[in-house]
Image: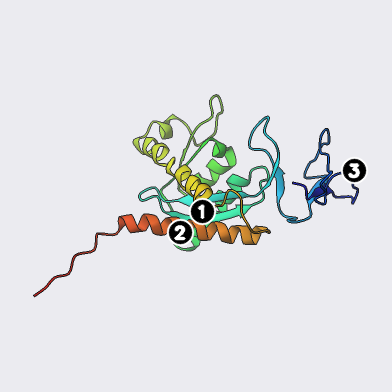
């Protein structure tokens, strides 16, 4: 965070890694400040009252039967990044000839545009609903179905993936700079997780047989 300084080149006692930097009472935003070590990283808060940190947004698409990651992507943590990344990941699967019957997601994807995009592609939107929000294409006919209940239960496995990627694979605090390198590290970590899960799916090796 000490590398964050004003974009106009001013100093104001902050930025540049100075030991005597004083940030108290100073407002920093992505419009006025940037880091000198990774120009693509952005300041973002995880919630109200939380401090801002330099970060990227990681996105993953998982198949629900075995919990394998089908696609991973890293973007800037801007508004609506999750929905845009989800559409891009689904497009990648379509180019490979794969089109899911349904897509399960949390409340962050409960948006009219995303639901309409899924419906136009013949994909059932199994998305957690936000109370008192009406989204065309996402109503009781969908949420009362058995498939919806299964999707909402299984989709939580994606949080297990992110938990492993952050705590074991080290993606919570990456050691590289630049979106492309961060994305490559994220993808490699996802491949490692897939290999671990695939090993559990493989049948046990048979012992040696002697004639």
Of residues 21 and 28, the one nearer the viewer is: 21
Percent coordinates x, y for residue 92 in the rendering: 52, 59
Q: Which residue is mark 2?
A: 192
Q: Residue at x 63, y 61 (%)?
A: 181
Circles 2, 1 touching at the beta carbon (< 8 Å): yes
Q: Which residue is mark 3?
A: 12
Q: Which residue is mark 1?
A: 169
* SS category of the residue bearing label 2: helix
2 or 3: mark nearer the eye = 3
Q: Is residue 207 above or below residue 105?
A: below
Q: Is residue 14 left or right of residue 154?
A: right
* SS category of the residue bearing label 3: loop
Question: Which is nearer the N-term, disc 3 or disc 1?
Answer: 3
Of residues 119 and 201, the one nearer the viewer is: 201
Q: Residue at x 54, y 29 (%)?
A: 130
Q: CA distance from mark 2 to mark 3?
A: 45 Å
Q: Residue at x 68, y 30 (%)?
A: 49
């Amino acid at each position: 965070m000490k590398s964050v300084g004003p974009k106009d080149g001013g100093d104001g006692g902050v930025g540049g890694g100075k030991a005597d930097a004083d940030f108290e009472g100073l407002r920093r935003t992505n419009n006025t400040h940037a880091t000198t070590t990774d120009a693509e990283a952005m300041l973002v808060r995880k919630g109200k009252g939380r401090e801002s940190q330099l970060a990227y947004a990681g996105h993953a698409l998982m198949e629900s039967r075995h919990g394998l990651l089908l696609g991973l992507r890293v973007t800037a943590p801007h508004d609506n990044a999750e929905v845009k990344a989800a559409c891009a990941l689904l497009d990648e699967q379509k180019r490979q000839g794969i089109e899911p019957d349904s897509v399960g997601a949390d409340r962050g994807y409960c948006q009219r545009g995303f639901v309409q995009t899924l419906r136009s592609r013949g994909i059932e939107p199994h998305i957690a609903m936000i109370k008192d929000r009406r989204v065309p294409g996402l109503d009781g006919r969908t949420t009362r179905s058995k498939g919806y209940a299964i999707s909402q239960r299984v989709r939580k496995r994606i949080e297990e993936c992110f938990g492993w990627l952050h705590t074991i694979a080290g993606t919570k605090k990456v050691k590289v700079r630049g979106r492309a390198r961060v994305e490559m590290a994220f993808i490699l970590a996802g491949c490692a997780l897939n290999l671990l899960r695939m090993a559990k799916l493989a049948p046990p090796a048979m012992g040696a047989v002697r004639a």
